[in-house]
Image: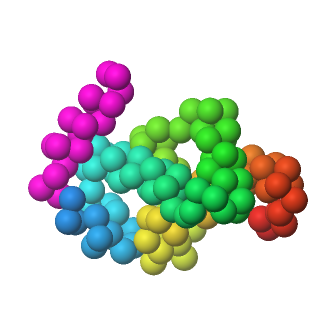
Amino acid sequence: MKKIALMLGILLALLPNASYASFINNYNDWSKLSDSQKSAYGYALWDQAMNIGNADDPNYIALTTGLTNCQKAVNFDGAMISAAIDRYYRLDQRHLKYAPPNVFYTTIVFGTCREDINKERVAKHLETVK
């Protein structure tokens, strides 16, 4: 309950900046955010990944179950996701042109969590993610 209250507080604090999220198109935009804005943005990306799809679709079920298992193992939070995005941008200058969601899906979803997602996909007789 405390976590939910904290996240709601952060959300309320960031509401004036909520429209800014759609204008974060690359590293230059990302670098202008404060650490708390980056953390909230990272957590929102995670939340979005968990809520895109049809609850009856086996692909969606495998994705969300795999991500949930990965999150439990790694214990991701917004700050960790934001740090992963920062690290990804620092590793290679070619990445600077990509928007944070692209970086998030590359590093977290199909990087760190690929094994958990594929385990769920195999259990549902689906092709693994390469």
Residue 79 place in picture, x, y as percent: 42, 41
Q: Residue at x 62, y 33 (%)?
A: 72
As rendered, which of 99 and 11 lies closer to the eye? 11
Farthest left residue? 16
Left/right placement of residue 36 relative to residue 76 reads left
The percent position of residue 47, horizontal first and vertical second, equals 45, 50
| Residue at horizontal 45 percent and vertical 57 percent from the top | 48
Is-magenta flag for residue 127? no
Instruction: Please tell me in which quadrant of the rendered image residue 124 appears.
Output: bottom right
Percent position of residue 68, x then y: 62, 41
Q: Which residues are magenta?
A: 1-17
Confirm whether residue 81 shows in the render: yes
Residue found at x 58% / y 56%: 55
**Quarter that holds the N terminus:** top left
Depicted 73 relative to depicted 123: above or below = above
Q: Quadrant of the C terminus?
A: bottom right
Residue at the image point whose x is 54% and y is 76% from the top: 94
